[in-house]
Structure formats: C-alpha cells, structure tokens
C-alpha cells in the first residue's frame, strides 16, 4: 500500500484527499460491456482499477472513472439466472413478511430491483411492491412478470419524488447496490426518503473483511465504486440519519453482510460484536489494510502457471460463466483465447458475444458436453455448490473443475 502521487481525488464520504493506495490492478475495460462480433476490431476503452483508502474515514473506494448512467442504463446482468440467488431472495421475503407482519396495506420498495427476482415473492404473498431499477431493459422484464417497477436512479430528489407518488415503505431493500453508487451520500438520502419513520431498511453487500481474508480481488471492478466494512457502512448510513441496529453475516458473494437500519433505534449486540471483529482484523486502521497486493499476486501467478502448463500438455481448458468478476480476473492475468478457449453462460443475452478486453467467446452451456474439455475454469466461484452440481457430468469423461479463488483448486466433480 503506497502513496498515490499528486492526483488526489476526494473521498466520496468525507471529502478528505485520497492519497493512499489499497490495490492497483492496472487498466481494465468495463466488466459488463460484452462485445458483438462486429466490435472486435474496433477500439476498446480501458480505465484504471486503482483502489484507494481514505486516511480519515477508512472508506475503500474506486474513483468514478465512469458514471453509473453509462454502466447501468442498459445492463447484462439478470438476477433470475442464478437459482441459488433466487432461493436466497425467496427465503428473505418469507422471513420479512412474517417478522414485520406485512400484508395488503404494507409497501415493500426495492432499489436496484433488477428483473423482479425478489419482489415477485412479496407479490405472491399479497404485499404491494415498488421496484426502482435504473436499467430499462431489466426493468421491462420485471414489469412483464407483474412487478411494478420505475426506471430511475435513486438519489435524494428521486427518493422524495417516489415516496410522494407511491408512499413511504414499511421495508426498503437494497441488495448488492450500495457498493455500486458513486453518489453514496445522495443514494443514502434517497433510502431515508423512501422508508417510513418506523420502517426498516436492509442492505446486502460484500464484506471487505471477507474479500481480503479470501483473496476475492476479482470483485474489484468499475461497477463497484467502494468496498465496505460494517464500520464504513455505518458511517455512510449515518449521513442520512439511519442507524444500524442489527447485522448478519451471509455466505453469498463469498461473504456478505445484511445490515438492518432504521431512522430511529440503537445497535444490538451483533453490531458491536462484528465491529470488534473488524477491529481485531486491523480494518479500523489504515495500516491494517496493508499486504493484500501480495496475496493478489499469488492468485495471479498460480492461475497463469496452471493455464500455461495445461496448454503445454495439450489439455483443453474452457470457462463456465461470464460474471463481472471473471473479467477482472482474466484481464488482470492477461488470459486470452489461447489459454481459455471460450466460456459458457446460462444468460442467453450473452450468447454469441465476447468478453470485454480478452475477447473470449461466450457460448451456451451445452457446448461443454459437446466438446468434452479436460478442464472447466469456474469464474463465478461464489456459486461453487450450484455450479459443481450443474457440471457433475464432466466427470463422465474425466473432466475436472478449476476454482481460482481464494486459491487455485483443481477438483473432480
């Protein structure tokens, strides 16, 4: 971790100058900009993946080289293509209906509601909903499924306008979006505007403590503007008068937090215990964030060595999945189609396209059974259990699965 030179962008939470590097992955394209065949010979824009830490408030953040409107107005990620994530959403919805006593006179508002993967469970329970989704193409899918959805970016003004039109919500949900917002303070104000004075806000986001502990550096990409601990999330929510009253650790995305916040309330024991765990891990000081870059290099070296060895032995290696994290990993490791022939994905919107930067082609998952490769590199490693079950058949011909994170593993399914 080093000084970042003379260019010192301000911290988006406290406005202090950012002078300390947390991780520098060089240059990378936008990880969800999948290319058509006619775009392969055109120029492609790469942006720095230079993550800094604020010396004052400790927020770990990536400069907003690209605005949210460019990234999220037309988006290739559809939550419903992950079976395990849909089940995660169903369990949460049933729990909230029961614990909060939600019914036909209630309102649940979800920000970054995607294709309605979560709100449809509330609809099925007879609870009125509102989805707030910036990507028009994804929001259209939600509306077609019967989920009332507004195509908007959330900020202080839009939050107030939506609350005026639809009413304030008993429950406001923001899953895997809090790290995706350049205007952290404005977005938080929008959350506060949407919730009733006695209501609840829940957020889920990847926990920086687990990211570091498990070498999950591939979750660093331009769509993730900051990387949160409970401490920094608590400080951000406090800017809009929201108090973290409870927190739970989740296995999703390699280790996430579900934070419960209210306009009024006091922190429960779980909040104090997790803050103490973060402090013990060193994450309440700048110095405690040092050393991650060396772990990142080890992941890169092991993967590149494996792929070169497989190529030298005449082994066939293909990928499974085309997630954003996979594009960070492949671009940082300079992996191209000579080392990874192609990848596959269940999302039909990606078929026939190519990964950004590496130009590796994306096919339908059936391609694996047809080609019978020696190895399948699993890029969405966070779905290990689900994907291992889906790919169990490759063992019929001696195929093996490769997981690059947290450390290289080659396993027989």
Image (cartoon, rainbow, N blue to C red):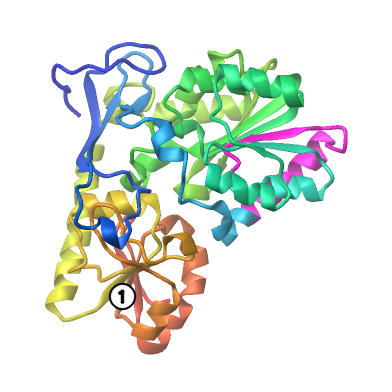
Q: Is residue 377 above or below residue 78?
A: below
Residue 247 within the magenta-colored segment of the rendering = no
The quadrant of the picture occupied by the N terminus is: top left
Q: Which residue appears at 37% of the width and 66% of the height?
A: 352
**The quarter of the displayed image where residue 380 is located:** bottom left
Depth check: 124 or 248 in front? 124
Q: Is residue 55 above or below residue 107?
A: above
**The quarter of the displayed image where residue 71 is located:** top left
On the image, the x and y values in percent for residue 139 come to: 59, 44
On the image, the x and y values in percent for residue 3 come to: 16, 22
Q: Residues within 10 Å of mark 1 (few under 14, many from 20)?
A: many
Compared across the picture, whether 342 is left or right of 382 comes to left
- Specify the segment rendered in magenta: 87-113
Depth check: 331 or 155 in front? 155
Farthest residue, direction front: 38
Compared across the picture, whether 261 is left or right of 78 comes to right
Q: Is residue 195 at all visible to an observer of this figure? A: no
Q: Which residue appears at 57% of the width and 31% of the height?
A: 152
Which residue position is annotated with label 1? 375
Farthest residue, direction right: 104
Q: Is residue 58 above or below residue 173?
A: above
Q: Which residue appears at 21% of the width and 53% of the height?
A: 300
**The quarter of the displayed image where residue 107 is located:** top right
On the image, the x and y values in percent for residue 303 come to: 22, 60
Depth check: 215 or 344 in front? 344
Q: Is residue 263 above or below residue 406?
A: above
Depth check: 128 or 231 in front? 128
- Element under disc 1: strand
Q: Is residue 276 at all visible to an observer of this figure? A: yes
Q: How many marks?
A: 1
The quadrant of the picture occupied by the C terminus is: bottom left
């Amino acid at each position: 971790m080093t000084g970042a030179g003379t260019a010192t962008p301000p911290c988006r939470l406290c406005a202090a100058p950012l002078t300390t590097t947390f991780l520098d992955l060089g240059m990378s394209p936008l990880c969800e900009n999948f290319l058509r065949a006619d775009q392969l010979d055109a120029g492609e824009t790469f942006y720095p993946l230079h993550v800094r830490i604020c010396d004052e408030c400790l927020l770990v953040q990536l400069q907003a080289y690209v605005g949210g409107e460019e990234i999220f107005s037309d988006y290739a990620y559809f939550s419903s293509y992950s079976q395990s994530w849909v089940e995660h959403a169903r369990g949460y919805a049933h729990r909230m209906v029961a614990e909060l006593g939600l019914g036909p006179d209630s309102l649940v508002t979800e920000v970054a509601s995607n294709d309605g993967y979560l709100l449809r469970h509330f609809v099925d329970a007879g609870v009125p909903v509102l989805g707030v989704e910036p990507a028009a193409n994804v929001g259209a899918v939600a509306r077609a499924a019967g989920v009332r959805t507004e195509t908007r970016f959330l900020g202080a003004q839009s939050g107030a306008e939506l609350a005026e039109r639809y009413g304030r919500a008993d429950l406001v949900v923001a899953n895997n979006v809090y790290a995706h917002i350049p205007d952290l303070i404005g977005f938080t104000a929008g959350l506060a505007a949407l919730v009733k004075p006695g209501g609840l806000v829940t957020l889920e986001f990847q926990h920086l403590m687990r990211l570091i502990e498990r070498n999950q550096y591939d979750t660093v990409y331009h769509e993730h503007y900051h990387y949160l601990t409970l401490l920094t999330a608590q400080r951000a929510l406090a800017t809009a008068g929201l108090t973290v009253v409870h927190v739970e650790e989740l296995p999703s995305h390699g280790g996430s937090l579900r934070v419960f916040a209210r306009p009024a309330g006091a922190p429960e024991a779980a909040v104090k215990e997790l803050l103490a765990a973060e402090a013990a891990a060193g994450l309440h000081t700048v110095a405690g964030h040092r050393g991650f870059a060396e772990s990142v290099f080890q992941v890169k070296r092991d993967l590149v060595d494996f792929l070169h060895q497989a190529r030298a032995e005449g082994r066939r290696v293909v990928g499974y999945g085309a997630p954003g994290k996979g594009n960070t990993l492949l671009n940082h490791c300079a992996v191209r189609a000579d080392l990874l022939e192609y990848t596959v994905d269940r999302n039909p919107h990606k078929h026939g396209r190519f990964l950004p930067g590496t130009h590796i082609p994306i096919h339908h998952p059936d391609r694996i059974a047809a080609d019978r490769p020696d190895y399948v590199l699993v890029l969405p490693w966070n779905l290990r259990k689900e994907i291992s079950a889906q790919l169990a058949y490759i063992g019929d011909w001696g195929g093996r699965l490769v997981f690059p994170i947290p450390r290289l593993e080659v396993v027989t399914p």
